[in-house]
Each structure stands twice: as structure tokens, then as C-alpha cells.
Amino acid sequence: MSINSSLLAGVSGLKANSAALAALSDNIANVNTVGYKRSQADFQTIVTARAAQGSYNAGGVTTRTRQFVGQQGLLQQTTTSTDLGIQGNGFFVVTDKPEGVQPTDARSFTRAGNFQLDQLGYLKNAAGLYLQGWPIDKEGKVLSDPSDLTKLQTINVTAIGGTAEKTTRIGTKTNLNSNQAVSVAAALAKSDPTDPAAYDAAKATTSMAAYDPTATPPIGTKPDFEFQVPVSDSKGGRRSLTMSFLKSADPNVWHVEIRSVPKGDVEIGGGLNNGQIKVGKIGFTQDGKYDPAFLFPAGVGLFGDVNATTKAPPEPVIRLGASDAATPGATSKDVKWNTNLGIQSQDVRFDFGLAAGGLSQFSTKSFVETINTNGTPFGNLTSININDEGYVAAEFDNGVTRQIAQVAIATFGNTDAMKAVSGNAFQVSLDSGTYNLKAPGTGGAGFISPSTLESSTVDLSAEFTGLITTQRAYSASSKIITTADEMLEELLRIKR
């Protein structure tokens, strides 16, 4: 009967507009939810078969609610380095728990990038979902797989703790005065090396390392110039090397001693004394530049001999053995770190000619302008930085920066068909298609926008307008029911 169908059509209108009101309510309630995607109830007609020609049965209306997941919200700047937005396509991969994630555990996908550190150092957003990414190994390689979610790991920014780097390179901008007068000890070293007052690096009584003017009588040879170089060991401990220079009686040649201060930091062979690590001579060209290929008699050059065939200079490296290495022999010139220090071996390269300015010998006073080393003492975590390619880096108070992981971006063929779950996240559905994991900014995936958050896509003016029209439509549907009821009541009066 047409009146009955009208009554049912009114009921369907009430249901449909109630669903529309629910979608509008969700939108308005989430107007400030980070990364929220607005929902919309789409109305569809229901058509019923006609019983006979000239009659009509109302079918009514139904709704299908959809969420505009692929719609980009406005990115707003924040002051938190772990707040992340995505400029373009894709989602963050997140899990419900930080540790013990199994292949069978569900992964979710979200645009809500308001991540903060939890008490264990994991990045967790406001919904309690943990950010996943590809770990970076010690060689700086990203261990990625575009199709395997199990290769992802929950990003922990405090897992590496404090850090230290041992010194492997020293550069300096230093000048040695070419007008420096040749000392008596240096002159005797050439004219009469057997004289007790002659400079001899191998003797504890005449080396620069042994110089002590307060002793009675004074011992050692006073350096013409010296300076200290800070060095970091494998544990981040602070060590110090002293470089002493004595002008030779030969033109453009200087005696050099490199020693540890204090001398107890090293254990040395019998061919060295007072903490010496390296002794020998260096030479300069006639225009005052350091000459690594200066020819010396065998065993006299600070770093070794020039190759007789290729004329290649020796490697400007000093080698310090590990604390657990064998004690240097009585006649050797080997050096190791003190056994009690318990630190690794260390090779240190001296860039006398490559560093800006380098080591020079000009006609001006001796001075040290800069000393550059690449080692760092132990440092504690101070901040976390994430760049637009998704690399998560930890910064330490000693100046070291370490990359920890790369944030993965998941893309889908049909994002609007993804299944919404609690926590402003989504999961794979049959219609959405499977995920593709990509590095940010590659293969159609968006770039990471650090220190930003994606705003909700809700437009309050549109939602309030929708509220008005939905309310009117609901009232109209209720009017259909009351009208149909009055008509049925009139029909019942016929019998009376």
C-alpha cells in the first residue's frame, strides 16, 4: 500500500539523516584532531518495484558514509622537532606496542604525526601509536625493504645512549719562525753529537721531552717552540699530546718530538723516553711550506723515509697500540696506551700540509692559529632532528650527530577505501589495495615536513551549514510519518 510505503520512506529518511548527523558530529568534534580526515554521508535512493501500473511505492533513502582519507590538511609549524607532517601522499606506519612486534601483529597507518618520546625513548603519538622506520647500520646504510613490513622497527632515539669518537686526524695552522736562532744543543747535535750537551732525542738527559729547568743541574733541551693538541681516546677520554720543535743547524730543518702528557698515559719502548711517541725531523721548502718529501738519512724523518723508487712521502701517522697489546720491547720505538686505561688502538694522521694554512716556516714569530681534530669526548643526547627525507638523527653535546633510522612512508592505490580504526589511523582493506613502503620523497611518496603538524580537514562553516540542512531534512522526514499517520487514521474512520 502506498501509504505504508510512504511511512517507511519517512523512517528511512530519519535513519539516513541520523547517519548524516553522526558524520557531521564526528567532524565537528575532531576539528582540532591532528591529521583527522573529514567524513561525509552520501545519500542514495532506494527504488522498489511497482505492483501495478499507475501505482507507486516509495522506496526511501539510505546513506553510505565515506572518509576523505586522501585529502591533504594544512601543515602548521610547531616548535617540537619530533612533530612530523607529510607534504604529499603517504602515511606513517605505526604499531600498538613498541617492542616484541610479531609479523602477525596489525600495522596501522596514520597522518597524525604528533610524536613524542615515551619513557623508553620510543616515538609515540597522542593516540599511543608507535612510529616505525628502517634501522640504519653502523656503516650508515638503510636496511630497507619496500614490501616487507617486518623489516621495519619501532624507532628508539635513546638506544645508542652516549657516544664518543676517538681522534684519527689532526690539522693545524702553525708557523715556525725561520729566523729562530739555532741553539747550542742543536748546533752540537750536528758538529759534535757525542758532546754531553748536544741535543739527542733518544737520551733522557738531552731530549726535549725531558726538559726540566728546575732540576739540579737542569736536564733536557729547551724547545724553541711547542704546543699541545687535545686528543680523544676510544672511550671519549681526554688525552693530550705535546709537539716540541727545535730548529736544526741544517737550513729548513726542525727537530720534532711528539709526546704524551702526562707521560704515564703511554707505555713506550726502550728507544723512547719521557712519554715520547714519535721523534725525528721535518723539512720545509725554500718558500716556507711544509715538505713531506724532504730527504733525510734513513730513520731520521719524523714519519719515516721517502720511498726511494716512487719518491712518495711516508704516511704522516702515529700509531698507538691498544692497552691490552704486548709491552713494547727494550730497543723498539713502539708505543701503546697504558694497560690500566683499557682503550683501543689508535692511528692519528697529521695533516701538516693539507689543513688550511698547514705547518709553515716564515720569517715571523712562531705561533699557533688553529688546531683542528676530528675526535670527540663522551657526549650525552641533547636533541633529536628529523629531516625531509625522514632520517632520524640524534645530536650529542660533544657535537656528534648519529643517524638512527629512516621513517618509512606507506602509499596505497585507493586511499579513500582504507578502513578507519581508533586512534585516527587506518588499516588495509580489500578496496584500498596493498601498501607500498617508500623512502620519503621517492616513488610518489611525500616528503617529511619536520616540526609541523597536519591540521584536520574539517571546515566548520561547511559542517554547521550541513547541520542546518540535516536538521531540516530530519524534520521533513518526520513530517512524512505524521502525515502518513493522519491518512491512515482517516482511512480507519471510514468504517465508523
Image (spheres, rainbow, N blue to C red):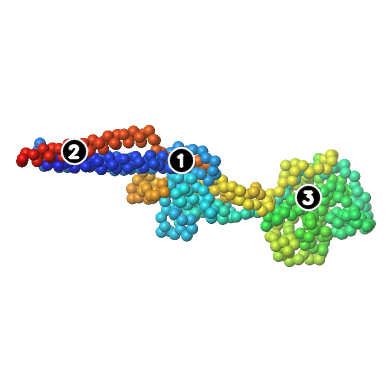
Q: Is residue 156 visible?
A: no
Quarter of the image with the N terminus in it: top left
In the rendered image, which quarter is residue 298 located in? bottom right
Mark 2 highlights which residue?
482
Residue at screen point 55% across, 52% down: 157
Residue at screen point 74% across, 51% down: 230
Between tags 2 and 3, which lies in front?
2
Residue at screen point 73% across, 58% down: 320
Query: Badge 1, how many Cα within 10 Å: few under 14, some, many 20+?
Result: many
Mark 3 highlights which residue?
228
Q: Name the residue nearer the viewer: 162 or 357.
A: 162
Query: Badge 3, how many Cα within 10 Å: few under 14, some, many 20+?
Result: some
Q: CA distance from mark 1 to mark 3?
A: 53 Å
Label at residue 454: 1
Q: Which amino acid, mark 1?
A: Glu
Q: Earlier in the sequence, mark 2 or mark 3?
A: 3
Can you give x and y, in whole percent of width and height, for residue 443 in the image?
45, 44
